[in-house]
Amino acid sequence: MQHTVTTLEVKAQNQPETELESRSVRVGLLGGTFNPPHLGHLVIGEQVARQLELEKVYFMPNAIPPHVDHKEAIAAVDRVKMVQAAIQGNSLFDFELAEVERGGISYAYDTLLTLVQKHPNYEYYFIIGADEVAYLPTWHRIDELMQLTHFVGVNRPGVSAPKSEFPIQFVTVPDLDISSTDLRQKIAHHESVRYLVPDLVAAYIFEKGLYQDDDRN
Ligand SMILES: Nc1ncnc2c1ncn2[C@@H]1O[C@H](COP(=O)(O)OP(=O)(O)OP(=O)(O)O)[C@@H](O)[C@H]1O
Ligand SMILES: O=C(O)c1ccc[n+]([C@@H]2O[C@H](COP(=O)([O-])O)[C@@H](O)[C@H]2O)c1
């Protein structure tokens, strides 16, 4: 069963919302399952924010990723807490809980409709890895989604240079060959994940005993 987060215990950690609300702002959105979040996510968030001069990058854990054959992720509450731990200390980073609070399959189109209504002065840049760029044509209501957000593609090791029929902006980031899948396997096999995930995320994983069971990874 997928759990949803119904209460938001932690307020946005950085700039007060009121300050951002009063002017037009370019913000990044890094959607993901974050099962678990890792250094690859942080590097792409930082690089895109700096290179495109975004004011914030919102890390947005999904509820159920819209893939037919996805493996069940761990509880949303754990993924949210790991994301919050991962982004600590970077004033460019914040988090967005629209998808876990909504629950169900997290179609980006539904999310952006809500976010654009909530923050009419935000210009969104949805960040996706090269692996996801190829699937963009299959995204739910992609043509309408393109009217609600820009897309930013970033390179990812092992994935050939992506091309897209859509007007995507590409940003080059340092290659980090890290994936959540690989991390889950490493943890189950008692291999080191140090310097692959932030220390606070590793501490959370081991305190909660996450990803120990190989069958669920
Ligand atoms: N090392 C990386 N380099 C570039 N992009 C990445 C990297 N890791 C993740 N991304 C991108 O970040 C977004 C969120 O990723 P996600 O949470 O699914 O992590 P993941 O490592 O791809 O997970 P999994 O291995 O479980 O599929 C996706 O658009 C993905 O392509
Ligand atoms: O809206 C869609 O149809 C859609 C299809 C595939 C992926 N996404 C989103 O893209 C982000 C990256 O996906 P994933 O599976 O790599 O974590 C995440 O926020 C997903 O919810 C969205």
Image (tube, rainbow, N blue to C red):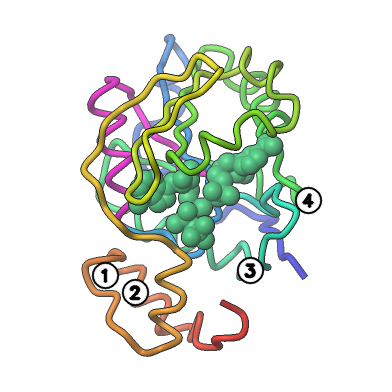
Residues under numbered marks 4 and 1 in contact, where contact means CB atoms less than 8 Å apart: no
Q: Nearer the viewer, residue 12 or 83?
A: 83
User: What's the residue at 26%, 45% (across, down)?
Assistant: 90
State the separation of the CA atoms marked 4 and 3. Answer: 13 Å
Q: Position of residue 200 (x, y in %)?
A: 31, 69
State the separation of the CA atoms marked 1 and 2. Answer: 5 Å
Does 93 appear above or below 182?
above
Q: Nearer the viewer, residue 170 or 76?
A: 170
Residues under numbered marks 1 and 2 in contact, where contact means CB atoms less than 8 Å apart: yes
Callout 3, which amino acid? Ala
Q: Residues within 10 Å of mark 3 (few under 14, many from 20)?
A: some
For marks 4 and 3, the one nearer the N-term is 3
Q: Nearer the viewer, residue 44 or 177?
A: 177
User: What's the residue at 68%, 33% (across, down)?
Assistant: 139
Callout 2, which amino acid? Ala
For marks 4 and 1, the one nearer the N-term is 4
- State which region is magenta: 39-61
User: What's the residue at 35%, 32% (across, down)?
Assistant: 15
Which circle marks residue 75 in the picture?
Answer: 3
State the separation of the CA atoms marked 1 and 3. Answer: 20 Å
Which circle marks residue 104 in the picture?
Answer: 4
Residue at which label 1 appears:
199
State the separation of the CA atoms marked 3 and 2. Answer: 16 Å
